[in-house]
Image: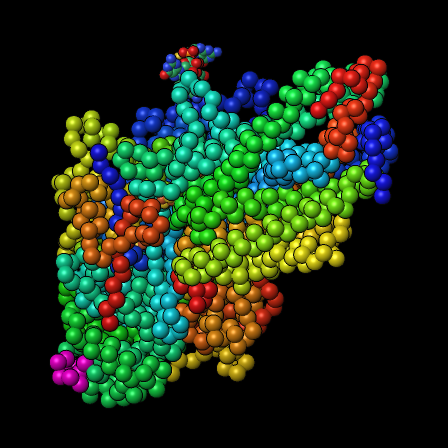
Amino acid sequence: MPQWGMAVDLDRCTGCGGCVVACHAENNISTVGDEQAAVGRAKHWLRIERYWEGDFPDVRLKFRPVMCQQCDNAPCEPVCPTYASHHTDDGLNAQVYNRCIGTRYCANACPYNARFFDFFNPSWDKPLQLQLNPDVSLREVGVMEKCTFCVQRIRAAGTQAKAEERDVADGEIQPACVQSCGARALVFGDLENPSSEVSRLSRSPRGSKLLEDTGAQPSVTYLSRLTQV
Amino acid sequence: MDRRSFIKLTAVTGTGAALASCGNPENDFIRFIPDEMIVPGVAVWKPGVCSLCPAGCGLTVRVMDADADVVRDGQAGIVRIAAAKKLEGAPDHPVNHGGLCARGQAAIQVTYHPDRITQPLRRTGERGDGLYEAVSWDDALAEIVSRLDALEGAGNQGSLTYLTRVGRSHRAALVRDFLVRFGAPPPVAFEIFGDDVLRRANALSFGREQLPTFDLANAMYVLSFGADFLGTWNSPVAQNVAYGRMRQGRRGVRGAFAQVESRMSQTGASADEWVPVRPGTDGVLALGIAHLLMSTGAYPSDAAGRAGALIEGWAAGLPGYAPEDVERMTGLEAARVEGLARQFSDARPAVAIVGGAPLAHSNGLFTALAVNALNALVGAPGRDGGIFFTPQLDVAAAVQSGSPAQPAVALESLVTEGLAGGASPEVVFVDGANPVFTAPPAWRVREWLEQVPYIVSFGHFLDETSILADLILPDHSSLESWAEALPESGAVMAVASIAPPVMRPLHQTRATPDVLLEVGRMLGTPLALPWETFDELLGASLAGLPSASGSGALADARQAGVWSGELPAGLAVADSADTSPASVPVAFTAPEFDGDADEYPFHFLPYSSNAFLDGSLAHLPWLQEMPDPLTSAMWSSWVEINPVTAERLGISAGDVVEVTSAHGTVRTRVVVSPGIAPDLVAMPAGQGHRTFTRYASGRGENPVELLAPMTDAATGALAWAATRVRVTRVGPPDGRLILFAGSLREHGEEHR
Amino acid sequence: MTHPTGQQITRDLVRPLLLTTWRFYVMIALFGAFVVAGLVAWLSQVYFGFGLSGINWPVFWGFYITNFVFWIGISHAGTLISAILRLVNAGWRRPVTRCAEAITTFALLIGAMFPLIHIGRPWLAFWLIPYPSERLIWPNFRSPLVWDFFAINTYLTGSLLFLLLPMIPDFAVVRDSTTGIRQKIYRVLALGWRGTPKQWHRLESAMQIMAIAIIPVAVSVHTIVSFDFSMAPVPMWQTTIFGPYFVAGAIFSGIAGLIIAMAVLRRLLHLEDYLRPLHFENLGKLMLVMALLWGYFVFNERLVTYYGNGPHEMAVFWRTQRLSFAPLYWTMVVCNFVLPLILLGIRRFRTITGCVIASFGVVIGMWLERYLIIVPSLGAKYLPYSHGTYTPELVEVTITVATFAAMCLLYMLFAKVVPIISIWELKAGEHPSPALIPPATEKHQLGDLHL
Ligand SMILES: Nc1nc2c(c(=O)[nH]1)N[C@H]1C(S)=C(S)[C@@H](COP(=O)(O)OP(=O)(O)OC[C@H]3O[C@@H](n4cnc5c(=O)[nH]c(N)nc54)[C@H](O)[C@@H]3O)O[C@H]1N2
Ligand SMILES: Nc1nc2c(c(=O)[nH]1)N[C@H]1C(S)=C(S)[C@@H](COP(=O)(O)OP(=O)(O)OC[C@H]3O[C@@H](n4cnc5c(=O)[nH]c(N)nc54)[C@H](O)[C@@H]3O)O[C@H]1N2
Ligand code: SF4
Ligand code: SF4
Ligand code: SF4
Ligand code: SF4
Ligand code: SF4
C-alpha cells in the first residue's frame, strides 16, 4: 500500500501563488467575496505563509506553502464524532463532506489550521459554475473542507494503473498544486517506495517537519531554504 | 442608469421572457442538440495558449461535458456543451514546461465570467453611462463598414486609430496589415509597465530590439536590478522554472542571487541578498561593479564591445564609478559594492537582469545600457548561464503578404496633439487596451477619446475605455477561438504557441481577427487581405516552417499547441538595423522627479500587481481572493510604508491615508512593511476600477492616478517611478484592507 | 423572624402555585419575548447559513461553546450541592435543595442545546447518537464529543430523577390543597403517593442511592467537558489540570447561580422566613472555598505554563495576561477571586446582599473564564500566519441573552407549578415529629405517616 507524501523545497518556492489558484480551480473551492474574506472566511486549502525577519535594510521574507499535512497521527481524526475525518490505508487524511455535521472540532485539533469551514452554501455566479470539476464533490453549508492531496487524481491514476495491471509510476500522480508549480518546489509521491523522488527528498538533511513536537507526524517534509552570501 | 442596472435589466428581461414563454408550446425552453460529440464524464485534454500576458505560455485544457444555460437566436435553453474545466501548463511547452502562474490558472474565469459582454452592443445613452442596446452582427458590421467607407470617401483613412496592447502575435500582424492596407497609421500600443526602454537599450547594445531570455538554470550568480522576474516581469513562468533549477536542480551546486531594489518585490523576497539603493541609481551600481571588474584586470574593457562603447568613460575603466562614488550616488556602502562585484566576478557564469522600476526613471535608458554593458563585460550574451534573444518568426515574411513593422505611434504624443487642436482621429478601434485606466490622468486620454466621433471596442467587458465606445463587438475568449502568441522571451529556440478553439463560444461573440477580415472584405474598396479567416493566416504563416512529424507545422501546432524549432533563413526577424553606436556615449545623469522634495517628501513606486498586473485581470474572482505574496491582502489595495516612516507620521497599520502628488490624490489604507526604504512609498496597480465587472468596480485605488507625465529623456517612455508624493493620515482603519494573514512575523514580540 | 411550622409552611409554599399576579404575566411575556428572539436568531442562522455568527478561521469555537460549558457548569449547582449536603445530612440544606436541583435540570437542558446551535448542520445532529443503521455506521467512540453525548444524557437523566423523586410527596400535598382540574393534574403527578411507611422508605432509599450515584456522574460530566479542550493539541488546552479545574469551576459557578436564584425567589415569593440569612451565609462560605480552589487552579495553570515557556503556549499566555484579552482576563480575576474574597471572606460583608453581589461577579467571571479558555487559544494556535481574532455577531449575542431569559422563564414556570421549597423535607427538618408530615386530610389519615 503506498503512503502518499509531499516534499516542499523552500529553496525553490518563490511565493508566486500559482499553486494556490490551481488548488481552487481543481477542487471547486468557492471564493467567498470581500465581506466574508474580511471576517476570516476565505478558504485557501493551500496558503503561502510569509514571514518577515529583521528590519530594513537587513530584512528577509520567507515563504512557506502550507496545506493539510496528511498527518499519520492526525489530531483531527480521533476528535471527529462521525468519522467524517478519517484515515485511509494509503496514508491520507480523508474528509467525507457528506458525513460531516460541522462541529469544527477537527479544525481546532489541527495544529496547522489547515481546515476550512463552509459558513454559507458555496455559490458561483452563473456561468462560473461551468468551470466546476465533476470529479470533486461540492460542499454545502456547515461542513469542513481541506486539502485532500487531490485524492481524485490519486484514485484515477490508481484505477488506470490497476486496469493496466501495473503499479502507479513515480511522478505519475501530480496534485494540481504540484503540477502548476513552475519552480518545481512541490514534489508528490509514495513515501513507501524508497526510490521515489519524494522519499529521496524527504530523507534530505535539509528536511524537517512542521510543528514536529505536536506529534501529528505529518506526511509533508519541508526542505529548508539555504542562505549563501 | 448605471452599468450595473443595465446588466440587471437585461437579466430581468431575459428571465421575464423565459417565464412568459412557459405557457406557449412554440416558445418552450428547447433542448438543443449537443454541440459536439462528447462522452459524458470522460475528460479530454486539448492544447491552448494563455493570453493573459505576452509570455505566451502553453496550456493543456481539460474539456468535459457540461450543461450550459445559453441564449441562441433569442431562445433560452440548456445546451450540453464541451466545456473547458481546468487549465494546466502544457508539459512540453518550451516556455513554461508544464508550469502555470496564478493568472494563467485563473484565465478560465474570463470565458465563464458572469459579466462578459455576450452580444454586439450599440450605445444608447451618453458616453460613459453604460447604456447599450443589443444589435445583430449584420447591423453592427454594416455600421462599421459605412464609417470606414466614409473615411475613405473623404480621403481621410489616416484618421483611423487602433489602440491595442503590446505583444507579438499573428493577430498583431493581421491588425497591422489591415491598417496599412486601409491607409491608416500603425496601431498604438500602450502599456504602463511596458519594456520599451529595455527593448531600445537591447537594440543599441546587442542589435536586438527585444526582451532578453535568461539562462538562469545554468547561472551561478544572478544580479537583478529591480526586475520582478519571478512575479510579473517578462516571462515569469519560464523564469520560475529556470530559477528552481538554478537553486536546486544541479547536484551539489546552488546558484546565488542578489536583488537590487528599494521596495522588496516577490522576487526580491527570494534573493540571498537584498540591496536597496536610491531610486534611479541602479545603473551607477552596475557601472561601479563593472569598474571593479575591469580594475582587477580579469575583464578587459573591450570585452564588452559595442555595449561598453555606449557608456562614457568605459574604455578608461569607468574612473568616475569607484566604490566611494557609487556609495555617494546610490547610498549603498562601498564595502557592499565591492562584495557584489566580488561575487559577480567569482561565481561564473554570472548574469545581470534589469527591468521594471529602474528603467522607469528619467535616466532609464542609461540604466539599461549600463546593465547591458556589465553583462557584455562578463560575456553573458549567448553564453550558457547568460542572456539570449529568442529567435522571432517574421510573420510579414512568412505570410508573404503582410506589412513590415513600422515604428509605433506613441499614445502620449497622439493625445497631446489631438487635445491641442491638431489631428485627432475620426474613428478609434480599441482592442485589448484600457488606456483610460492605465495612462496617467495628466495625459487626459479620456478627454481625448470623448472628442473622437466614433469608437469601436472589441472588449469582452465594459472597462473604463470600452464604456466610451459607440459600438462594442465582443471578441471570443481565447478558449473559444484560435489562440496564439509568438513569445518574445522565455525560450532559446523560436516558439509559436498556437492552438485551435477548445470549446464552442458560449455567447454571440466573434473572433476579432475574423471580424477585421470580414470588414476588410465588405468595404467599398475591399482590402484584398488574402485570407478568408484567421486560421488561414496562421496556416500560411506556418507553412514555411519545418515540421517534426512531416504533416506540416500547423498540424503539429494543432496537436501540441506549439511549434518550436529552427527558423528557416529569411523567416527570422533580422537583427536590429540600428547597429551604429549612439553618437554620444551616455553618462549617469541624476534622475529627475516630479514634485518638490519638501512638499512631496516620498518617492512613489507603483508596481505591477502579482494578481492583476496593470489591472487588466482585476475582474477575476480567484485573483481577487488570492492573498498577495507580500502582504496577504485580498480584494484590496494599499500603500506600503516603512515602519520608521509610519511611526514618524503617526500612522499605524490599516490606517486610512491620503497619498497626494502634484497630479492627484488617492485615499487608501496602509500596510506597514519592513521591506521598503524609509523615503519610498509603494502601491500595487490593478485596483481602483470605476467600471470593470461586479468583482472589480469601485474596489480599491489606482496608483496611476497620481503619476506625473514624466518620461525617460532618451526614449520618451513613461517614467512611472519618477513621481513624488506626500502621505497624510486621514483616519483609523475602516475595514477595507482585507488581510488573510494573522501575523507576518513568525517570532513576535509577544515571546520576549 | 418567625419560624413557620405546620400548616403555615404548607400555606406559604403552596401559595405561589395558587396566587398569580399580573407581574407574573408581565415577566413571563418579557422573558418569553427574549426566548422567541433567540429562537428567531437560531432559525435564521440555520436558514441563511452559519456565517451569520462571528465564528471564523481560525477561531472555530466562540460564544456557543462558551455558553455550553457555562451552562453545564451552572448545572453543577444543584445536584452536587444538594447531593453532598444530603449525604452529610446538613440540616440547613432543606429549603435549598429543590431550588438547586431545578437549576441543574434547566441549566443542563439549556447547555445541551448549545451543541445543536453550534454545529454547522444541526439537522444531522442525530449522527452523534449510536443508533443502529443498516449501513452499520456508528459514531466515533474515540471522540470526546460522543463522550459528551453520553455524559450529558446520563447526568440529565440522573438529575431529572433526583429532582422528580422528592417532588412526589409535595405533589401529594398540592393535590390535597387544591380542587378541580388542578387537583386532577396533581393527582396524576403524585403517582398515588399516600405517604405509607413503605413509600417513605422507598423514597428515602432511592434518594440515598441517587445522591451517591449523581456525584461521580456530575464530576465526570465536567471532566468530559474539559476533555473537549484538553484532548486537542491546542496551546494552553492540553493540560492535565483541566478535569479538576473544570469541575471546581462548575461547582463554583453553580453555587453562584443558586445564590442568585434563592435571592430572587426569596424576594418575589416572599420566602424570607424560609430562605434565611443562614442559608446565604453557609452557601457563601462554600463559595469562598471554591473561590480559593479556583484561584489555586488558575495559579497552577498559569505558573506551570510560564515556567514551561513553550513559545506557542506563551503566545496565548501573553495574549490573555497582557495583550488584547488582558482587560477581560483581569475582570475575570477580580470577579472570581478578589470580589468573593472580600465579600465572603470578611464576615461583615457576608450578608445576603454581599453574597448576591459576589455571586453575580462569579457568574460573570466564570462565563469569561470559559471564553478566555476558548478564544485566545484558538486565535493564536501555532503558525502565526494563521492567527486570528473573533468578534461575536448579533445572533450569538441574542441567543446567549435568550438562554438567560430561558433559564428565568423555566424557573418561573417551574415555581408556578411545583413548590420551590420541598415542603416535606422542610417539615421533616423543622419538626422531626412524624405527626405533622404531611398534613392530614380526609383522605390521608395522620396515622399512616411516619419517617
Ligand atoms: N441520487 C441518486 N442517484 C442515483 C440513484 C438514486 O437513487 N439516487 N439511483 C441510481 C440508479 S439505480 C439508476 S438506474 C440511475 C438512473 O439514472 P438516469 O438513467 O440518469 O435516470 P433518470 O434521471 O430517471 O432519466 C434520465 C433521462 O432520461 C429522460 N427520458 C425519459 N424518457 C425518455 C425517452 O423515452 N427517451 C429519451 N431519450 N430520454 C428519456 C429523462 O427525461 C431523464 O432526463 O441513477 C442512479 N443514480
Ligand atoms: N418512483 C420511482 N420508482 C422507481 C424508480 C424511479 O426513478 N422512480 N427507479 C427504479 C429503479 S431504476 C430502481 S434500480 C429501483 C431501486 O429500488 P430499490 O432496489 O428498492 O432501491 P433503494 O430505494 O435504493 O433501496 C434499497 C434498500 O437497500 C438497503 N441497502 C443499502 N445497502 C445495503 C446492503 O449492503 N445490504 C442490504 N441488505 N441492504 C442494503 C437500503 O437501505 C434500502 O433500504 O427503483 C425503481 N423504482
Ligand atoms: S507555485 Fe511553487 S513556487 Fe509558486 S508559490 Fe506555489 S510552491 Fe511556491
Ligand atoms: S466538523 Fe465535521 S469533520 Fe470536523 S470533527 Fe466535526 S463532524 Fe468531524
Ligand atoms: S494537517 Fe490538520 S487536517 Fe491535515 S491531517 Fe493533519 S491534523 Fe488533520
Ligand atoms: S494537493 Fe490538491 S488539494 Fe492539496 S493543496 Fe495541492 S491542489 Fe490543493
Ligand atoms: S506568465 Fe503570462 S502567459 Fe504565462 S501563464 Fe502566466 S499569465 Fe499566462
Q: Is residue B294 magenta?
A: yes
Q: Residue at x 53, y 38 (%)?
A: C219
Query: What is the x, y in percent for residue C20?
Result: 85, 31
**Is B362 left or right of B387, judged from the image as shown?**
right
B70 and B160: which is toward the camera: B70
- Looking at this rendering, what residue extends furthest in the front direction? C433
A110 and B184: which is toward the camera: A110
Query: What is the x, y in percent for residue C43?
Result: 63, 34
Q: Residue at x 45, y 76 (%)?
A: B678
Quick check: can you spot residue C117? no
A103 and C3: which is toward the camera: C3
Query: What is the x, y in percent for residue C331?
Result: 62, 58
Location of the C terminus of chain B (image quadrant): bottom left
Q: Is residue B70 magenta?
A: no
**Is B675 left or right of A171, judged from the image as shown?**
right
**Is B287 left or right of A74, judged from the image as shown?**
left
Q: Magenta stretch?
A: B293-302
Q: Residue at x 54, y 68 (%)?
A: B652
Residue B260 sits above or below residue C23 on the image? below
Residue B434 sits above or below residue C120 on the image? below
